[in-house]
Image: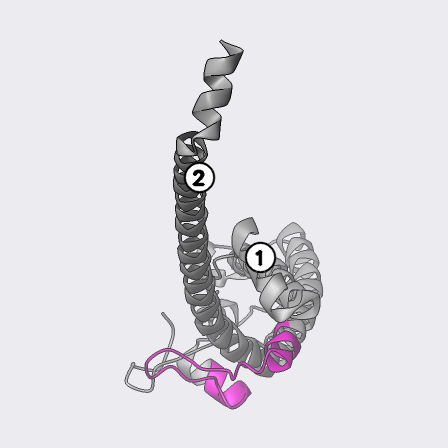
Amino acid sequence: MFRMTRDWWSNGKARHLIGLFAFEFVVIVLGVLTAQAVADWSRDRAAQRDMLANKERADAQIAKMAATAIAYDRVIPCMDERMIMVMRAASGDGQIDPAMLVRPIVRVEPFTGLSDEIIVLLRARHGAEVTDRYANLAVYAQRTAELVALLANGWQSLSIMSPEAGKVGAGDRQEARIVASNMRSTLRSLRKTSVNISNLARELRIAPRFAARLRAPAGCADLWRWNSVVYDPDDVPGPA
């Protein structure tokens, strides 16, 4: 048996066959590795395209958030002044002008946060500082929504001061003062949040941009004329 194996090896056929086998094995392995590399490259390209698409979507939303933040920064002092007027009116015995209790139309811009997978790719491409700004903007977007909801609910609660709802009692006046005071605190928080959004957008080099023909009031006169934090010039001015 040993002699047969030795003779088979000595005649060169065995080495030739083994050489062919080794060559085919190497070709197959290289083919598999190449296919895997191409697949990995394709997946990476697809992931990068997905990341860029998500970033562009986020940037467009941030541009609208920044524009609305500017609008809030302009009109919050006007709303705060209105709350002071309500508190003063609630301190006396006279009736309050119902127009002072009409809530202006508020606005919250949607912001779809980036997924964990996109965050990882964004961090790898743009660095931790840029990625953290997007994460912070998601937090401020949520905070803005919460504050605006508080503001809307608070304004609704002020209807207890309306003479149209009947006689306004001492308890109603006291409650209105408390609500207006809380709303002033909410307005201060909203203004800080709006400033933070504007700053982060500027650091990301994203210019504020409203959708369509929307505008921010130039001041208090615009706010109460249109009765809206953001308005369309083609709309009819006045309460909603």
Image side of residue 74 versus residue 36, left or right = right
**Percent position (x, y) of residue 215?**
42, 84
Amino acid type at image mark 1: Ile
The answer to whether residue 115 is visible is no
The foreground one among 37 and 79 is 37
* Mark 2 closeness class: few <14, some 14–19, many ≥20 residues within 10 Å: few
Amino acid type at image mark 2: Gly
Which quarter of the figure has residue 185? bottom right
**Percent position (x, y) of residue 30?**
44, 48
> Bounds of the magenta span?
197-223
Decide: is 224 above or below 107.
below
The answer to whether residue 239 is visible is yes
Q: Residue furthest toward the top?
A: 1
Magenta highlight on residue 37:
no
The foreground one among 181 and 174 is 181
Decide: is 207 above or below 64.
below
The foreground one among 156 and 147 is 147
- Mark 2 to mark 1 CA distance (whole Å): 50 Å
At x 29% / y 81%, what residue is drawn?
Answer: 235
**Percent position (x, y) of residue 211?**
37, 78
Q: How is the protein colored in the picture?
A: one colour
Secondary structure under the numbered disc 2 in the rendered image:
helix
The foreground one among 226 and 142 is 142
Where does the C terminus fall, quadrant-wise? bottom left
The residue at which mark 2 appears reads as 19
At x 38% / y 81%, what residue is drawn?
Answer: 214
Residue 119 - label: 1
Image side of residue 114 versus residue 43, left or right = right
Decide: is 124 above or below 9.
below
